[in-house]
Image: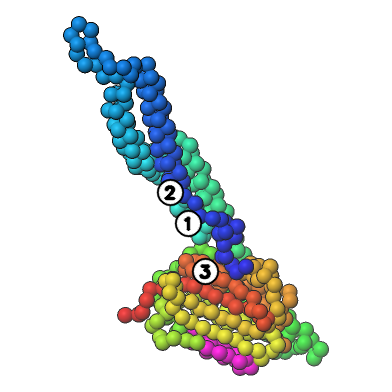
Amino acid sequence: MPEGAPGAAGRRRAGPSLRAKLALSYAGFLFLATLALGGLMLVVLAYVPDDNLVVAGTGGFVPNRSDLLRVALPLVAVGFVFLAVTGVLGGWVLAGRVLRPVGSIVEAARAAAGGSLGHRIDLDGPDDELRRLADDFDRMLARLEESFAEQQRFTANASHELRTPHAVMKTMLQVALADPPCPGSVPVLSRLEEMNDRSTRTLEALLLLSRADRSVMAQERIDLVDVVRGALGRAADALAGVDLELQLPSPGVAVVVGDRELVDRLTDNLLGNAVTHNHPAGGTVWVRVDPDGGGAARLTVASTGEALDASTVRTLTEPFVRAGGRSGSAGRAAGSGLGLSIVSSVARAHGGEVRLHARPEGGLEVVVDLPATGSVP
């Protein structure tokens, strides 16, 4: 199942809203009460004689049971219809007022599900059950926001602290390689330098992941086609032995709003992931950009590779997770396992979405939807 696909909740049959149910309940109870009152009236009329009645002594007319029923039944029928309509309309208005706080809670829950933990309900009104529920929900959001912020600060601080010793070690290794103590130490020093570079790239990726999880710093209009062309230029050497198929529209058609540096890194990671895990070496990479009719600019990157199962694909956006069944191209490192995590975090920070699909022929397809603004003026 692709990421973001609906689960059991998405397969539930549609039903009336809670407001409609409450309105119908109010109207039903009102109608039953009126029906009971009408029944009581009929019971009372049962004791009225149905004979021709006159007032003793004067001979005046007195209505009997049939006369009363002939007058009362049309009025009762009209009253039933009036009360049914009034009950539904009144119940709808009253249910809306009662459920208004629930709408605020639902909006806050949707914002939290979308990654925005800074939203608060701050419900006004008396100290009733809904007010206490909203306050508890706000406290939960505050604790979650504090926990995520602490985690992000730890990641950023740890990455910053480790950058300096890695830079020092790189300098020392370069000095040692320039004048090795013995010829046999060169392979070891080269291997150490390679591992140090890999650790440095992992730290840089962690810093970028922490930044993307916090927020989008810049807000500028970005031509996604221009971003992809820049990424293709930076990855020209890696793509040299790959069959590359491009589908790019005219410039200015697919435009997004956000942080250019983060969007560049998202595209670089998608291309790097497609090349690194391409199998066999020299396979095919497909890159497509188009404006989506749903109000988003879409970037699709796919590549050939090993067959992947759905359970593996669902975990590929988690940090430090690699598909065990996917083998990298010859001579290429397997990577830090943060590439698609950064893609997912950058897309989420921009209000977008990432979906991963295992290709039936083998390999992976990644679809990224980012908020669009139309053509550049």
For residue 21, above or below residue 38? below
Label 2 to label 1, Cα distance in Å?
Answer: 12 Å
Q: Write the residue at 51% across / 60% down.
A: 115
> Disc 2 vs disc 1: Cβ atoms closer than 8 Å?
no
Residue nearer the viewer, 322 or 23 = 23
Q: Secondary structure at mark 3?
A: strand
Residue that mark 1 sits on: 111
Q: Nearer the viewer, mark 2 or mark 3?
A: 2
Q: Looking at the image, can residue 270 be seen?
A: yes
User: Is 232 colored magenta in this rendering?
Assistant: yes
Mark 2 or mark 1, earlier in chain: 2
Q: Nearer the viewer, mark 2 or mark 1?
A: 2
User: Is 372 colored magenta in this rendering?
Assistant: no
Instruction: Identify the amino acid type marked 3.
Output: Glu
Colour setup of the view: rainbow
Residue 353: mark: 3
Q: Residue furthest right?
A: 184
Residue 374 image position (x, y, % from top left): 37, 76
> Disc 1 vs disc 3: Cβ atoms closer than 8 Å?
no
Residue 82: mark: none
Mark 1 or mark 3, earlier in chain: 1
State the extent of the magenta-drawn residues as a range.
227-246
For residue 121, above or below residue 83? below
Q: Residue furthest front?
A: 52
Residue that mark 2 sits on: 103
